[in-house]
């Protein structure tokens, strides 16, 4: 899979947040978005995810053969983990991940391995409302393990994670890249030392 962008520009509300952004990610590559609050890091992730429309420019997610993905095929190629954990407090931990598995079209038997991978097996029956911030973040990130998708879009993925959980995340990212996956992450913290960096700036 390959992700390319040329002369990208986008609005948030009535305000332009970035313009003339270019990117080119090949299999096994990661890009870390940097910049001050309000510079458009989350907006760019949401544009790549197909949740926001570009003001101008050209963005393509393509197969290795150069065929551009569109519609449902494109959606099925992307995992987007936002900075807000989408967790329903009325559900238990296992139920939460089963709910996301159903949304993704992943098999129900993918839930137990995903819980194990993120150190959540012992919390499977616990109410999501009782989770700590770090546990909630791990539960959100566990969606990455439910189904293999080539492009991971991660917004502040390290938030609230302790040292051990950060190592779990980094190990998962390195494994994904080692399988030819792509990662675009927005973060203020050190993340993936070998990744390229794109710094976005606030425009007046």
Image (spheres, grey):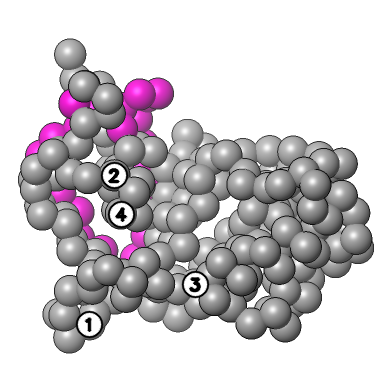
Residue 67 against residue 75 in the figure, above or below: below
**Frontmost residue, 13 versus 38:** 13
Circle 4: is it few (<14), some (14-19), or many (20+) Cα within 10 Å?
Answer: some
- Residue 52: mark in rendering: 2
Alpha carbon distance from label 4 to label 1: 20 Å
Residue sticking out furthest to the bottom: 65
Circle 3: is it few (<14), some (14-19), or many (20+) Cα within 10 Å?
Answer: many
- Residue 50: mark in rendering: 4
**Frontmost residue, 15 versus 19:** 15
Of circles 3 and 2, the one toward us is 2
- What secondary structure do most residues of the magenta stretch adopt? strand
User: Could you say where residue 193 lies in the image, as x and y percent from the top left?
Assistant: 45, 53
- Residue 173: mark in rendering: none
Is label 1 in contact with label 3 (beta carbons under 8 Å)?
Answer: no
Say which residue label 1 marks: 64
Alpha carbon distance from label 4 to label 2: 6 Å
Q: Is residue 26 left or right of residue 58?
A: right
């Amino acid at each position: 899979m390959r992700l390319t962008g040329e002369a990208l520009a986008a609005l948030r509300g009535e305000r332009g947040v970035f313009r003339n952004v270019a990117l080119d990610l090949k299999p096994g590559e990661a890009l870390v978005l940097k910049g001050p609050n309000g510079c458009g890091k989350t907006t760019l992730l949401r544009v790549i995810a197909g949740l926001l429309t570009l003001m101008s420019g050209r963005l393509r997610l393509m197969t290795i053969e150069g065929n551009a993905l569109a519609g449902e095929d494109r959606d099925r190629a992307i995992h987007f983990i936002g900075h807000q954990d989408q967790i329903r407090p009325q559900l238990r931990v296992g139920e939460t991940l089963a709910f996301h598995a159903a949304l993704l079209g992943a098999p129900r038997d993918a839930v137990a391995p995903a819980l194990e991978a993120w150190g959540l097996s012992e919390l499977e029956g616990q109410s999501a409302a009782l989770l700590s911030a770090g546990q909630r973040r791990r539960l959100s990130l566990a969606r990455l393990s439910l189904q293999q998708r080539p492009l991971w879009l991660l917004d502040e993925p390290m938030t609230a994670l302790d040292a051990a959980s950060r190592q779990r995340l980094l190990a998962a990212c390195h494994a994904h890249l080692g399988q030819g996956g792509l990662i675009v992450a927005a973060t203020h913290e050190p993340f993936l030392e070998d990744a390229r960096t794109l710094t976005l700036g606030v425009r007046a």
